[in-house]
Amino acid sequence: MLDVKNLHAYYDSSHILHGIDLQIRQGEIFCLLGRNGVGKTTFLKSLLGLKVRTEGTVQFEGREIADLDTYERARLGIAYVPQGREIVPGLSVLENIRLGCFARRDRKVTIPDHIWSMFPFLREHLNRRGTNLSGGQQQQLAIARALASEPSVVLMDEPTEGIQPNVVQEIERTIVRLNREFGLTIILVEQKVQFARTSCHRFAFIEKGQIAAAGAAADLSDALLHRYMAV
Ligand SMILES: Nc1ncnc2c1ncn2[C@@H]1O[C@H](COP(=O)(O)OP(=O)(O)OP(=O)(O)O)[C@@H](O)[C@H]1O
């Protein structure tokens, strides 16, 4: 589905990613792991064409997208749940979800029904300001906004970071459900090792802007975690 070859990424003169090669398969949860500051978010932003200069090739469903604008990539079916959620202040729950609709390929502003069945709480609070929700509810909103574009792949950056422990499992179950029930491909930047182990199909560790190790979920050993995450 996504085929990344020799990807380099830069913020001005800072060279952050150094030749990443990675293939993401349709229908999988692919987990990106690594210590703080190694370039995981930058990798996601490179796939989105967001605020980072890149070299190399990024093919999505057979089409080269590295030169496309972010909105064009969104319309092809790539959605983003950013770190920190980035709920738009001043907009209601409904308006925040509708923002996702603008990235739809068919341009319809209809919110898909499965969003309401996944997130009944949001349906009951459509007119509340998004930023007045709790952290966990905002995370549901950020996921709902991404789903509103009817994407084929969703990039999620530490979706349970900063969320109350009792809500973390609910968000984790939602992510797994989106993949197992709805067949959504998910690229997940994750620091919670246990969730990475139980949810992902394949993984890669990034270290100093390069892929240091990669494999199937069963290969996610304590030795690798110790080496590349110091747990
Ligand atoms: N907008 C920016 N301008 C300049 N440097 C940046 C910018 N964003 C990130 N960086 C730098 O790029 C490097 C990689 O950052 P990135 O956020 O991709 O890492 P990460 O692995 O996602 O870390 P974290 O787990 O802390 O989110 C870091 O050294 C960071 O300071």
Image (cartoon, helix red, strand yellow):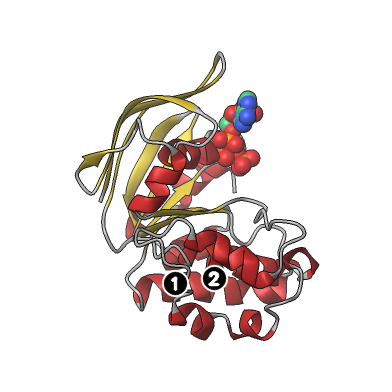
Residue 36 placement (x, y as % from top left): 62, 39
Q: Does the image show residue 18?
A: no
Task: Identify the residue at image location x=57%, y=58%.
Answer: 192
In three-dimensional space, the C-alpha distance between marks 1 and 2, rounded to whole angstroms, equals: 6 Å
Residue 204 placement (x, y as % from top left): 39, 45
Residue 231 placement (x, y as % from top left): 59, 49
Query: Which quarter of the figure has residue 169?
Result: bottom right
Question: Quarter of the picture for ligand 1?
Answer: top right
Q: Are marks 1 and 2 in contact (CB under 8 Å)?
A: yes
Q: Disc 1 designates what residue?
A: 176
Query: Which quarter of the figure has residue 41?
Result: top right
User: Looking at this rendering, what residue extends furthest in the left direction?
Assistant: 62
Count of numbered circles in the view? 2
Residue type beneath disc 2: Glu
Q: Under tag 1, what secondary structure?
A: helix
Q: Residues within 10 Å of mark 1 (few under 14, many from 20)?
A: some
Residue 70 placement (x, y as % from top left): 45, 41
Task: Identify the residue at image location x=36%, y=55%.
Answer: 77
User: Looking at this rendering, what residue extends furthest in the right direction?
Assistant: 132
Instruction: State yes or no: Cβ of the residue under disc 1 lies below 8 Å from any atom of ligand 1.
Output: no
Q: Is residue 132 above or below residue 102?
A: below
Task: Identify the residue at image location x=34%, y=32%.
Answer: 66
Q: Under tag 2, what secondary structure?
A: helix
Q: Disc 2 designates what residue?
A: 172
Residue type beneath disc 1: Val
| Residue in the foreground of this view, choosing between 215 and 79 | 79
